[in-house]
Amino acid sequence: MSLKQNLHNLKEKYKGTKMAPAFNAIHTFLYLPNEVTHKGGTHIKAADDLKRTMNIVIMALIPCLIFGMFNAGYQHYAAIDSSLRTDVLANFFTWDNLWIGIIKVLPLVIVSYGVGLLVEFIFAVIKGHEVEEGYLVTGMLVPLIVPVDTPLWMLAVAVVFGVVIGKEVFGGTGMNILNPALTIRAFLFFAYPTWMSGDKVWVYDAVERTGTADAISGETILGSYAQGNEVIYSMWDKFMGFIPGSVGETSTLLILLGAAFLIFTKIGSWRIILSTFIGAAVMGLIFNQVVAADIITESSKFYGLMNTVWWEHLMIGGLAFGAVFMATDPVTASQTNKGKWIYGFLIGFLSIMIRVFNPAYPEGVFLAILLMNVFAPTIDHYVVQGNVKRRMKRLKAKTA
C-alpha cells in the first residue's frame, strides 16, 4: 500500500476527532488537497494556493541560506587569520566554510521549524481547525535573521513566544497584526540583548579549537560604524555579503535577486520594496547634510553612522533583507497601492533614524517594520477615506 493511501486511511480513521487536523496537514503538505475547484461552478481557476505561495518565498530565501552557511565558516576562519580576506573568492566557497555553516546554521533551521510547527499543530488540535501553512516562511526567516551562535534553547523559547503571542492569539495566519518572524527577533533582542548586540556573537566562536579566548572577534559592521572604528570591508565585500552579520542578511546581491523573483511571481510588492529604499536614502541624505553643515562634531556618538554615505546604508545591516522579505508580508503590510508607498517609505525612513540614534544596537529595521505593522491598517483607512471623499466631490460636481 502506498504512503498516500496510508495517509488517506489515517485521515478517514481520525476524521472528526481531535487529531484530524494533524493528519490533514501532513497529507496536504505532501499531496494536493482532495477538494479542488478545477471543474464546474463559477470559481476562479488558478494554480496558486497558500502552500505554493509560501514555497515561492522559501525558494527566494534558499540562496541567502546557502550563502549564509559559507559566510559563517568564512568569518570564523578570517577572524583567526585575517590574510584570508586578501583573496575572498578563493577562500570563501570551501568545504571547511560550508561545514561550519552546516553544524551551526542547520540546527537553527531545524529548531525553528520543529518548535514552530509543533506549536501550530498543538493549536490546530486544541481549536479543531486545519493546520495553517503560514509558518512555512516564518520558519525559514527566523534562522536567517539571528546571529550564527544563537543558543538553540534560546531560539526555541523565542519561537514559542513569537508563534503564540505574535500570531495564534490573534486568530492564526491571516489575522496577525505583527510579523511573526520579527516578533521572535524582537523577543530575542529584549530578552537576551547581549546575544543580539554583542561584539562576538556574529562569528562562530570555537575557542576550544583555537585555544585562544580572544582569537575570535566578530563585531557587526554597523557596530564598527557606530563606535567610529575603522571599517576594513570594501564596497564589494558589503554588496556581495562577505561581512559579519546575521545568517541571511549580509548579501545585498542575493537579496536583490530574491526581490526580482518575488516581484516577477507577483508575491512581493515592488512598491513597498522601492519605497523602503527611497525612505532610507532620504533619511541617510538628511544625516549626511547634517554632518556636512558641521551641526554635529566627530566627538558625538552619532557621528559615525551619520557620516555614512546614504547609499552605503542600503547595503549594510538588515535593511535590504527587511525591505524584501519582511516589509512585504501581505498580512501585516498595507493593502492599498498608495498605502504601500507610505508604509514602505516610513519603514526605510525610521530604520535609518533608529540605526543612527541607537548606538547600543545600531540596527533599526526590525523595530521600524513592527511599528509600521501596527499603523498599516490606519494608513489604509485614511487612504480609502481620501478616495471616498474625492469621489463624493466629483459626484457632487456632476450633479450640481
Image (spheres, grey):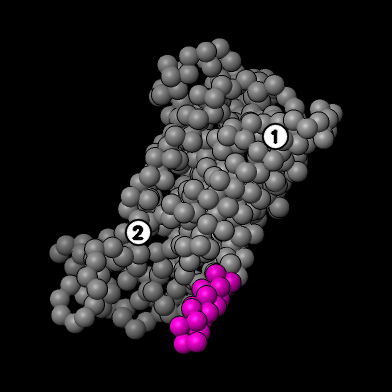
Say the numbered circle drawn on residue 245: none
Dividing the picture into quadrants, the one containing residue 125 is bottom left
Question: Does residue 154 lie above or below 398 as drawn?
Answer: above
Q: Nearer the viewer, mark 2 or mark 1?
A: 1
- Location of mark 1 (residue): 288
Badge 2 or badge 1: first in the primary sequence:
2
Horizontal and vertical percent position of residue 249: 52, 40
Left or right, 53 with respect to 366, comes to left
Q: Nearer the viewer, residue 112 or 46?
A: 46
Q: Residues within 10 Å of mark 1 (few under 14, many from 20)?
A: some
Q: Residue at x 45, y 73 (%)?
A: 124
Q: Nearer the viewer, residue 68 or 283?
A: 283
Q: Nearer the viewer, residue 292 or 334?
A: 292
Magenta region: which residues?
A: 381-400
Tell me the SS state at disc 1: helix
Amino acid type for the residue under numbered disc 2: Thr
170 falls in the magenta region: no
Q: Nearer the viewer, residue 345 or 10?
A: 345
Q: Residue furthest bottom?
A: 399
